[in-house]
Image: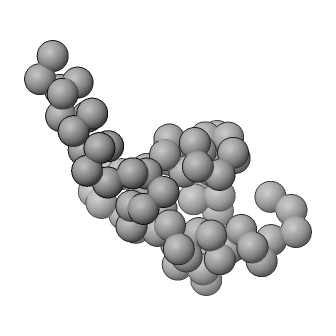
Amino acid sequence: MEQEYRKVRIDKVCPIYLKTTWTITEAAQCTGIGENTLRNIVQDDRNKRYNFILKHGNRSLIKREAFNQFISECDRI
């Protein structure tokens, strides 16, 4: 119960589209790109030059603004 309250509380304080970094799930919700496709993009070495991945331990976070720039330059994912 307490975890559900915390989750709702965080979302009310800062909407997903305003967060600096997204989890894979949040990025999928905001961009319409599937979670598996996003995981493949994060793991692909060719995307290192865009620098939109932030590693936090075992977790990969996506920098929102850099990822939006990457998407705007892509013709195909």
Q: Is residue 28 left or right of residue 18?
A: right
Q: In front here: 26 or 18? A: 18
**21 versus 8 height, above or below:** below
Left or right? Give the position of 55 relative to 69.
left
Q: Is residue 77 left or right of residue 51?
A: right
Q: Is residue 8 left or right of 61 when viewed as pictured?
A: left
Residue 8 percent across, percent down from the top left: 27, 33
Q: Is residue 6 visible?
A: yes
Which residue shows up at 58% across the image and 49% down it? 30
Tell me the quadrant of the picture where the C terminus can be found: bottom right
Q: Look at the image and tell me in which quarter the N terminus lies.
A: top left
Question: Relative to 16, does residue 54 appear above or below in the rendering?
Answer: below
Location of residue 36 (image quadrant): top right
Closer to us: 9 or 28? 9
Q: Quadrant of residue 20?
A: bottom left
Q: Give x and y (percent) for residue 54.
A: 40, 67
Q: Residue at x 77, y 77 (%)?
A: 73
* Residue 67 x, y percent position in the rendering: 59, 69
Farthest residue to the bottom: give it: 49
Does residue 39 appear in this view? Answer: no
* Residue furthest out toward the top: 1
Residue at (27%, 57%) from the top-left corner? 57
Q: Which residue is at a point 71% across and 68% down the rendered structure image?
A: 71
- Residue 29 screen position, x and y as percent: 57, 42
